Image: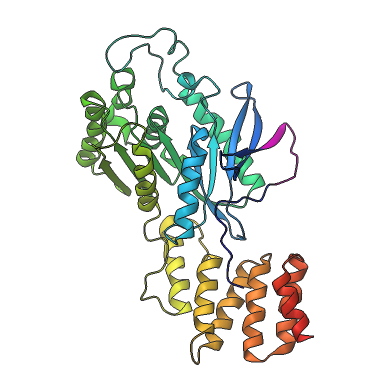
Amino acid sequence: MTFLKTNFSLLLFTCLFNNISQAQKIDSSGITIAEIKIIHSTILNEDRKIYIYTPENHSEPLPVIYLIDGEMISLVAGIVDFLYQVNQLPPVIVVGIGNYEYDRARDLTTSHSLWQMDGTTDSIFWKNSGGGKNFLKFIKDEVIPFVEKNYNSSPNKIFFGHSLGGLMTSYCLLYHPEMFNSYIAVSPSLWWDKESIFKNTDLLFKNKSFKNKSFFFSDGNEGAEYHKSVLKLLSLFEQKKITGLRYKYIAYPEETHNSELVKATQDGLNFVFENWKPVKSDTTLELVVKFYENRSEKNGFQELPPEQVINEMGYKFLNAPNKLDEAIKCFELNTKNYPTSYNAFDSLGDGYSAKGDKVKAIAAYKKSIAINPNVEETQKKLKALE
């Protein structure tokens, strides 16, 4: 069975967890964007809302984007979903961590300060500033374990933030690079507290490993002071020549602080997931498997060939002259790698059926139906053979 892609729909989970309630987030079109979970944080001593977008029909462990200011889930998950639909991005889970309903100034600043970018002070808005380290601890010790326990996530974790969220993303990369594999900081507020993030830069990169880390950052037309801080970070990277760190900076001078998000989200994701799929010259199953073996070695964790990539290759072979055995090898590999995927066994049934092996085709279709009895197409194919 070829994968059916639906535009931005989610399967909602019905399980209830201790100290967790759930709901749906629906945009103005009435489309379900994400499920909402309320997690009680002992670290922050409060209940916190997270939004979770999951793509449909995937058995393999998926990368996870941890999005600061999770209220932006409509934008970011929408772009993620669209890029996946057009095969520019692998399937990805997006976990939005709500901030606007809470003390955002507290959570998304790395030190206590009342100073604003223009040199004035605001003792009301910034009165609780400086809780960023605690907020990162909340993500590390409570959000990530919750996601890894309840969702089929891979070790590939991406940290995404905009504005003050971008400040936290940049801070996490510089001071705790081990937390995530990749970082995206859109218009990071590096001006915060008179650029305190750059203190002790001579010691900043000592005893830290940036091997296989990726960092995308950008800014718009926020003004000279804002731009100056971002360029200072770029200059720091260029001077230090940090071993193992891939980074890319893009300026969007025609975009505002907020409109920049649309372009930067796509560009950042394309950079982070660069070379995520085999090149056109990888025309055999062996070459594709080798491609992902090399990626696994490079990234430091196992990355199996995605079910959809192998499935699509299998159907190309199935529709090509004298390639039937290669198609069946593809489908067999998917059932081995993803034994709980009804689609993998349905495709294997298609392969055996095309070869005329009725017994194996029936067995594969029955296995698919045992996993998911609600697929009418598989039921019809099985009935036609019996």
Task: Decide whether the magenta segment is chiefly helix, strand or loop.
Answer: loop
Query: In the image as oriented, which residue stretches furthest toward the right?
Result: 386
Any part of residue 25 in sight: yes
Q: Nearer the viewer, residue 7 or 323?
A: 7
Which residue shows up at 48% across the image and 19% down it?
106
Q: Is residue 367 left or right of residue 155?
A: right
Which residue shows up at 55% across the image and 55% down it?
7
Spot occupied by residue 202 in the image (x, y as percentages of width and height)? 26, 30
75 shown above or below 167: below
Spot occupied by residue 327 in the image (x, y as percentages of width and height)? 55, 82
Spot occupied by residue 109 in the image (x, y as percentages of width and height)? 42, 22
Q: Nearer the viewer, residue 171 or 328?
A: 328
Marker count (numbered): 0
Q: Is residue 105 left or right of residue 43?
A: left
Any part of residue 207 in sight: no
Colour option used: rainbow
The C terminus sits in image quarter? bottom right
Within the magenta stretch, is there residue 14?
A: yes
Which residue shows up at 50% across the image and 68% down it?
309
Q: Is residue 168 left or right of residue 64?
A: left
In which quadrant of the rendered view does residue 50 lie?
top right
Which residue shows up at 33% across the image and 38% down it?
260
Spot occupied by residue 209 in the image (x, y as percentages of width and height)? 38, 43
Query: In the image as oriented, which residue stretches furthest toward the front?
Result: 29
Q: What's drawn in magenta, residue-wise?
A: 13-23
Query: In the image as oriented, which residue stretches furthest toward the top?
Result: 123
Within the magenta stretch, is there residue 90?
A: no
The N terminus sits in image quarter? bottom right
